[in-house]
Image (cartoon, rainbow, N blue to C red):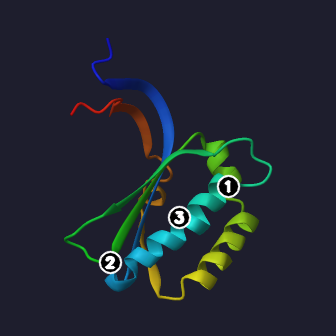
Amino acid sequence: MSRGFSFVSGERRPVEVLVFGMDPAHVDEFLRVDHEVWTLGEALLDGHDRIPFLAKEVWLDDSRPGEVTLVFVWESMEQWDAVGRPDIQQRLQAEFDARFPHPVRLVRALHEESAMGIHRVSRFERTQDHT
């Protein structure tokens, strides 16, 4: 019996964590453009038969206005590497820069700080709403 949740263990899914900083007045615009350019651009790449990542989450911290944390769970390092090709990244970055003219800085890339060692090993999720 599921009891409205699922538990998966034994995974080894690579995780990418990016923290960006910007003027708090531009966060909503950043979120919209990031989704339209980066999320959909990487998810719907020509030549790929499926979305290369399993999830992308966006986190905001009310105690740090203007800070946006993006968390990707990739299907595999091979999928992440395929999306990370310089020609793809340069094209998406140019489109993002053209559509988001405000200053934004990369504050941290936690996955790089750990030599790409962050990975998801399990997940516990609610599967149905109990209201």
Task: Categorize mark 1 by other alpha carbons within 10 Å: few (<14), some (14-19), many (20+).
Answer: some
> Mark 3 to mark 1: distance in Å?
16 Å
Instruction: Give the amino acid at mark 2.
Output: Gly
Label annotation for residue 35: 3
Residue 125: x and y in percent read 34, 32
Image quadrant of residue 97? bottom right
Task: Mark 2 vs mark 1: give the one in front.
Answer: 2
Task: Mark 3 vs mark 2: give the one in front.
Answer: 3
Instruction: Give the amino acid at mark 3.
Output: His
Considering only vertical position in the picture, is 126 above or below 49?
above
Residue 107: x and y in percent read 40, 73
Left of 54 or right of it: where is 91?
A: right
Label annotation for residue 83: 1
Label annotation for residue 66: 2
The quadrant of the rendering that contains the C terminus is: top left
Q: Could you say whether the residue bearing mark 3 is in a helix, strand or loop?
A: helix
Q: Are marks 3 and 1 in contact (CB under 8 Å)?
A: no
Considering only vertical position in the picture, is 123 above or below 65?
above
Image quadrant of residue 31? bottom left
> Mark 3 to mark 2: distance in Å?
17 Å
> Mark 2 to mark 1: distance in Å?
27 Å
Q: Residue at x 48, y 59 (%)?
A: 112
Task: Categorize mark 3 by other alpha carbons within 10 Å: few (<14), some (14-19), many (20+).
Answer: some
Instruction: Give the amino acid at mark 1.
Output: Val
Q: Could you say whether the residue bearing mark 2 is in a helix, strand or loop?
A: loop
Label annotation for residue 51: none
Number of numbered markers: 3
Task: Categorize mark 2 by other alpha carbons within 10 Å: few (<14), some (14-19), many (20+).
Answer: some
Depth order, front residue of 84/50: 50
